[in-house]
Amino acid sequence: MKLLYTTLLLIVSTAIYAQKKAVITGKVNDESHQPIDLVNIKLQETNQYTITKKDGTFTIQVSEVNNQEINLEFSYIGYKKITKQVFINKEQIDLGVITLKTLDLSLKEISINAKRNGDGSSNSSIIIDRDMIEQIPALSLNDLLNLIPNRKTSPPSLQNVQNLTLRAAYPDRNNGRDAFTLNNSFGVAIIVDGQAISNNANMQSYNPGLTGLSGSSIEKPHSWGLSGARNPAYSGDYAFGGTDLRQIPADNIESIEVIAGVPSAKYGDLSDGAVIVERQAGAGPAQIRMQLRDNATSYSFSKGTKLGHDLGALNMGLNYVNSFSDNREKLKAYKRINANTMWTNSFGREKQLKNTFSLDYGRNLDGVKQDPDDPKSTKTRFDSWNFGIGNRMNYRLNGNFLKNIGLNLKYTEGHQQTYLEELRNVAYILYSEATTTGITEGQFASGIYNAISLVDGRPVNLSAKLDFNAEFNTGKTVHYLSFGTSFNYSANKGEGRMSDPSKPRSDATTKDTGTSLFKSTGSERYYDFGLAIAQKDVGLYAEDIFKLKVAGRDLNFRTGVRLDVQNGFASVAPRTNINYQVSDNLRLGLAYGIGFKAPGLAQRYPGPTFMEVPLLVSYNGKANESIYLLYLDRYDPTNKNLKPAQNQTLEFTSNLKVNQFNLSMSAFYKMARNGINTVEQLRVVPLPRYSAEFVAGQQPTITQTGTENQLLTYYSFENSLKSNSSGLEFMMSTPAIKAIATSFNLSTGIFRTSTSNQSNQRDNPVENSNTNLNYGRIGIYRRISPVTYQSNARISATTHIPQISLIAEFTAEFALLQKTEVPDNAGIPIAYLNNALEYITITDFNPKDPLYGHLAISKSSYRESNLPRIIPNYHMSIGKEIKKRFKFSFNVYNVFNYQPTYTTPGGTIINPNPSPTFGAELSLKL
């Protein structure tokens, strides 16, 4: 510890010594040479901010270091952002007049494709700036992320939950709710304005202890609407996974940075990458946008108003979307309204304090109505609203060491309601309201009723981040040091899972028939989410950015470490991004890092699990002359030993520029450990066996006739998942061919992921009349460890004619590979339960053994829907701007209506390409 203090003292002492002040001045004008006030100016290295005065001038003070290079970023809503490199080699530096150009299609250098050029905070960063955002028809953030390499382009739609997975290939199972897919998306941080949109407090699901993670979704059955059985089952909930990107409108986004590799140590509570979103704040012109699609309409308005130079600027935005799955019957609908307000101001004589206060409101109405032509159809709703209040402050210091202090506070509260109603029509039902383990008497009730499942959640999230930026030098090396701390609080104050045991849904109904050894059925009870203890996670980080000269070239370092305490577990995550400028045209990079994602409240506190075993059902149609005895088993999971999911990433990158051709390549290897999943627990309980004799006018006479073993099953959360992913990403852009004013862009990749589940699985009981006590009834198997490959490519040709403000793009994409390989030992049992419910281990499987040979499962049962050939698809868009104010654009996905089909090994016909979908957008700048 003394050595640490001594080292810090030496660093500070070195920093204080021999540092002089340099002052940078300049002026910002528009294209008509008029000054622009309230332009945001950011010194990227030290995260310092300032703004221009009313006459467009600015002043910012930095430390003088000979030949030090810094980057100043100038941004203003409606203008193209520019970054200017400044060499600090004297005390007074005048940048002269800096001209910001209006962001419109008349610009020659407008960006039209995502780029990986080293400007981000990671070697793997992909930047999507406002230039591109304005050209993409987007209903949500998800549509903007189609530019990520090896991601299949999906047309704008809001009819399914939109979770993001990064750098992994998984089989398409369970409508995207496979445990590995959920873990990956849960580990991707969606960071908006410096704060993560947390899904930690989301508890919207059935009790996962009853059927496991795969059966916990509240779903609308697939047979609905005019498409009938072709519609997949639908759920609008996203507990256990990542944030639903449908909630985030695209209209007011200024820039996006996608980090699929090693993020900065500043960002915590993530394992699989981050998407960093910066929204528009400050003064700017009013803009009205309307998008009309065949399945959706979207309206938005935004305006940044100057309140006077001393009062800053107020930016307001409003967005409304109405979307249907099928416009012919409009049973499945999604509606969203968002409103946000940001007040930005700078204080102090030198405007050294910048503060942004924000208010956000969003409401989502999602669900499937009851079909008026089918009274037996179910009705589902997945409604929610959320409110957020935040404040970001940055205070610019002119000290020799400390340069900036940032404080970011965010409080969000929401209300989520999941509702499912189904008509039940059976003779009678059995139910019990008991909540303690033991034998109890149940009740009979009418089997004609409406079964209602209601889950009421009120997630509350509070986060605080305190960041410091400092600068010091060791010899001739300049270090930009950032360090800080974060605190995240997540709770759920909702009423919880409100189940009525007397009106159970069909999947949670006790059955009085079935195999005598396997009668147990999961039963639902009310569970108050307020009983879940609030989640409190704390983090610390430090990161140093510096460069060295090696062979006269820059060797850039961004190295840091992060300490997090999550669910009582402390974790240390080193992260390093290094790149070397080999030549003026070539840059090579190497990165390594570890990330940890804390388990959410739904995983920590899933609630008690109740299993019911009917012991005696004696019913003659009269409740007072009948009796129902059952054994109730209650299991209360603690999950206190649940560890954060962990991911290690190693990445090599290269960027090559040759004659305005830009090529970037990334090769990565990821090791994911401690993934969270439900594991089935088996327990054998000896229970009494009864007989009954009816007695007129009173309950039957009961006699115990013996005992028998019963198998009880329930699920608990464990760190049972691990996977290894590797792959290549490649991006290339060409300069415009002047004769046709067209440039080309290529994006492709290939991923390989091997997954492993450390738990075993059982098959359903074998229906057989064999009464031999040693006869195998339930097979126990190792979970298969498949290897999945995925590859997609996209080639786009973009014609941009700035003289007439016209842009047109044609895209050809190709699904090159989607394949899953299953090991040869799939379906071979490693143990079994016999008729006596004894656990018998199989050391050397013999398929001809009369006691267990029948338990082998054919390998064909594990076959996936592999892509049999390359599947192309084609898209087109065109946009025209008139007098820099009015813009019209039109786009078509699957423009040639190419809809090939192939048949899976199970006989299912697959249509890999969706039907053509089109849309038009009108935009007006006032």
Image (cartoon, rainbow, N blue to C red):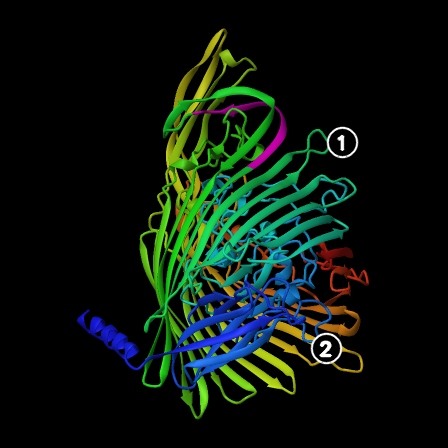
Residue 721 seen anywhere in this rendered image of the structure: yes
Identify the residue at image location x=58%, y=78%. Answer: 664
Residue 430 belongs to the span the image colors magenta: yes
As drawn, is 870 to the left or to the right of 544?
A: right
User: 249 or 59: nearer the eye?
Assistant: 59
Residue 716 seen anywhere in this rendered image of the structure: no
SS state under label 1: loop
Q: Looking at the figure, which quarter contains the C terminus?
A: bottom right
The vertical placement of 876 against 694, above or below, is below
| Gap between marks 2 and 1 measured at Cα | 53 Å
Residue 807 belongs to the span the image colors magenta: no
The residue lying furthest to the top in this view is: 697
What is the x, y in percent for residue 215? 53, 44
In the image, the segment drawn in magenta is: 418-433
What is the x, y in percent for residue 514? 53, 33
The vertical placement of 926 against 731, above or below, is above
Identify the residue at image location x=77%, y=44%. Answer: 327
**Residue 373, disc:** 1
What is the x, y in percent for residue 652? 49, 78
The residue that mark 2 highlights is: 743
